[in-house]
Image (cartoon, helix red, strand yellow):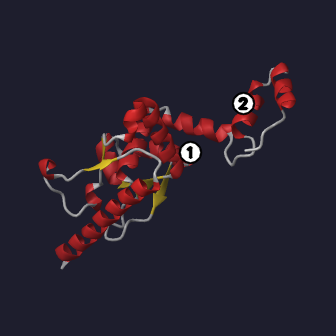
Amino acid sequence: MTESAPDELFELLDAGDVETYAERRLFDGSVDSMAAHIDRKKALADPVRYSILYLLYEYGAASRKRLASETGRNNNDLQHHLRELLDANLMAEIPAPEGADGRQTYYRITTLGKQEIAADLRNLLGERAATDRFEALVDPELAEDIPSESDVRRRPLTVVEDEEVSGEINGYRSELRTKHQAFQQVTTE
């Protein structure tokens, strides 16, 4: 981040241009802008959209069908919320994972989306955010099979910015997808 000269910044404040002052102080020289940042905050200001993004934070990826089921929204109402999150670059549409129903639309959380949720968790939970308080979920459509609720194996998710932990979670998700693919092959034969 490049810093504007202090005198130039004070001139902005003296002229009553607090928006340009804030833009330069926060985003000067970065790839982001205040407008894009505000758009992300607006997208997350709706409880349904925030909850969808939080689900994707825990799932990693999920089908539109799963999101519709878990939000209780019909396709048209859900589309509005998904579009807002897509436009704000908080989530992305992805191809159907191998072995999954290719007729379904799938979504994943983006790095920006992860940062938004992780920052909120740190702000809400403080030091507790680094403990094993959260469970990584898996979209049942992407899981090995669908056990009963009491048999669901849940794995603690540590909310820290640590590549080792991220690698472990991603490895777990890959392992589940591989098992799901093997299960699909066995059931179709």
Disc marking residue 19: none
Q: Which amino acid does the dot numbered 2 rest on?
A: Ala
Q: Residue at x 31, y 51 (%)?
A: 66
Query: Label 2 neighbourhood size at 10 Å, few (<14), some (14-19), many (20+)?
Result: some
Indicate whether 128 appears above or below 181: above
User: x and y percent of residue 86 in the render?
Assistant: 52, 49
Disc marking residue 22: 2
Where the C terminus falls, by quadrant? bottom left
Residue 116 as seen in the image, left or right of residue 34: left
Q: Residue at x 67, y 45 (%)?
A: 32
Indicate whether 169 appears above or below 184: above
Q: Earlier in the sequence, mark 2 or mark 1?
A: 2
User: x and y percent of residue 92 in the render?
Assistant: 49, 54
User: x and y percent of residue 85 in the render?
Assistant: 50, 45
Q: Which amino acid does the dot numbered 1 rest on?
A: Ala
Q: Write down the quadrant of residue 71 in the picture.
A: top left
Residue 151 as seen in the image, left or right of residue 6: left
**Residue that mark 1 sits on:** 88
Residue 97 as seen in the image, left or right of residue 142: right
Q: Write down the quadrant of residue 97 in the picture.
A: bottom left
Element class at badge 1: loop
User: x and y percent of residue 30 in the render?
Assistant: 70, 46
Where the N terminus falls, by quadrant? top right
Element class at badge 2: helix
Residue 56 seen by the camera: yes
